[in-house]
Image: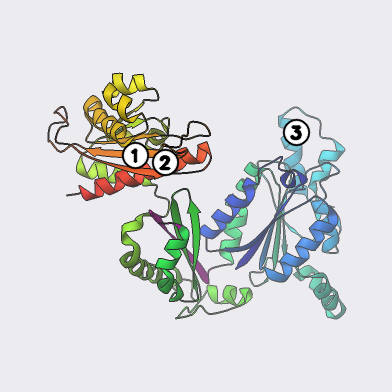
Amino acid sequence: MTTHIINIGDELLIGQVVNTNASWMAEELNKRNIKVTNISVISDGGDDIRQQLERSLAEADVVLITGGLGPTKDDITKSVLCEFFDDTLVRHQQTYDNVKKFFERRGLPFTEINQAQALVPSKCKVLVNEVGTAPCMVFFNAQLKETRDTRHETRDASADSQNLTLNSQLSKIVISMPGVPFEMKWLMQNSVLPLLEERLGAEAIVHKTILTFGIGESFLADKIADWEDALPSHIKLAYLPEAGKVRLRLSAYGSLMHNAQPTVLSFSEKCTMHNAQHSFPIKERLEREVAEQIERLEKIIGENIYGYDDETISSVIGKLLKEQGAMLATAESCTGGLIARRITETSGSSAYFKGGIVAYSNEIKEQLLGVRHETLEQYGAVSEQTAKEMALGCLNVTGADYAIATTGIAGPTGGTDEKLLGLVYIAVAHRVGTQRAASTDMSEVKCEKYIFRTTREQHQERTANQALFDLYKLVVSRKS
């Protein structure tokens, strides 16, 4: 089942309102194996709505529309749909009663403009909105205008009434919902998604995301080129780069009687076959195929993979620390506490995170972390020597088993010929002894130099990511 999402509203186009509806809808649809192939944001103009609806009906099985259902003159979606489907507006009594109660409960007058909310096209199926006033309208067997005109010439008078019937074999569906996010979500969860799932049943989509670090997108693409070229045609790969890391998303698509290639069936054929073969394990087979592909990928870039799907580098580190019964602490300068924030974003992090010190000034580096004054005088705050002493001092002060330390020049000022803008030193340390209060003389400390020439915000972001990756490598190396 292919789906188009149309979000209507001038406020979306001018950036006044962020279009959170589209991302939420697409995510929920994909969870239910409903493939979204297009998302459009259009103005409140009638011509724009008609043109986009024509395009979407030509390409998709289902068209989901949000916005333009309010009571004011600029909300014209309902009237445009009525015209598009050659229909007339009629009062829907259940919606009328619902809207009337809505205003009565609030002690507000039930005005004529609000009563108009209960007017809907006669051919639509109404899904009552219990958290707002604008109803959700479903048009089954939706057709392009030229198709409707041709069918109108040959059909008998009884066809009109048949179009109003809920028929699971009708192939095109248009659903119009209010644009208010909480109303749209309520309607999607309680009415729209169950309706679509009832008509699906014969196809599946499986997504799996592989999380990588330590290799840029282009170098990664070169390294896995042969593996990517060998992927079956129904398994697609997408590269999703972020600051210092790349997500690889595998998407597998399959239909009823899926073999080496997915069977191509019309939407109505899938719905017809659904009842007889509802239990066919399409999704399970796709999951096995994706797992096999990931096993092959791990042999190529296993050292760069740190997790899968919704895992974060900090949550993965947390699991490893809990397995070791170890504690972590941070000493941050240029990242200003960002690493500590990342770690504590994971629920339950108190089981392995001692705390963090933001040692921004040299005075705090000396007083709280025990960095030697001579080190700062000779090498400077942004140096390998200072970063190492910060990490070891963090182990001493907190009694943790692992520590991260960062010191750098985030910019846009502070760079020199000797120490360039974007320079950063990241140190990670591990206590070798068994007693946490013992001296760190035998502790292991590693420090790496990086240069991230970008904005201040991005410098901090990349430094935090890299510091967590460096720690991850150290923790994995100490894994028993």
Q: Which residue is identified by label 1?
A: 426
- Of the numbered discs in the image, which one, if any, rests on residue 295? none
Q: Mark 1 packing: few (<14 Cα in 10 Å), some, or many (20+)?
A: many
Q: Amino acid at mark 1?
A: Ile
Identity of the residue drawn at 79% across and 70% down:
144
Q: Nearer the viewer, residue 35 or 120?
A: 35
The answer to whether mark 3 and mark 1 are in CB contact below 8 A is: no
Distance in Å between CA atoms under marks 3 and 1: 61 Å
Q: Amino acid at mark 3?
A: Phe
Please determine whether, in this image, residue 183 is positioned above or below residue 235. above
- Of the numbered discs in the image, which one, if any, rests on residue 463? 2
Distance in Å between CA atoms under marks 2 and 1: 8 Å
Label 1 element class: strand
The answer to whether mark 2 and mark 1 are in CB contact below 8 A is: yes
* Upstream in sequence: badge 3 or badge 1: 3
Identity of the residue drawn at 85% across and 58% down:
47
Identity of the residue drawn at 50% across and 57% down:
240
| Residue 188 picture location, percent across and down | 61, 52
Label 2 element class: helix
| Residue 100 picture location, percent across and down | 76, 38
Task: Tell me the magenta residue range.
Answer: 201-216
The reply to whether the magenta stretch includes residue 421 is: no
Q: Amino acid at mark 2?
A: Thr
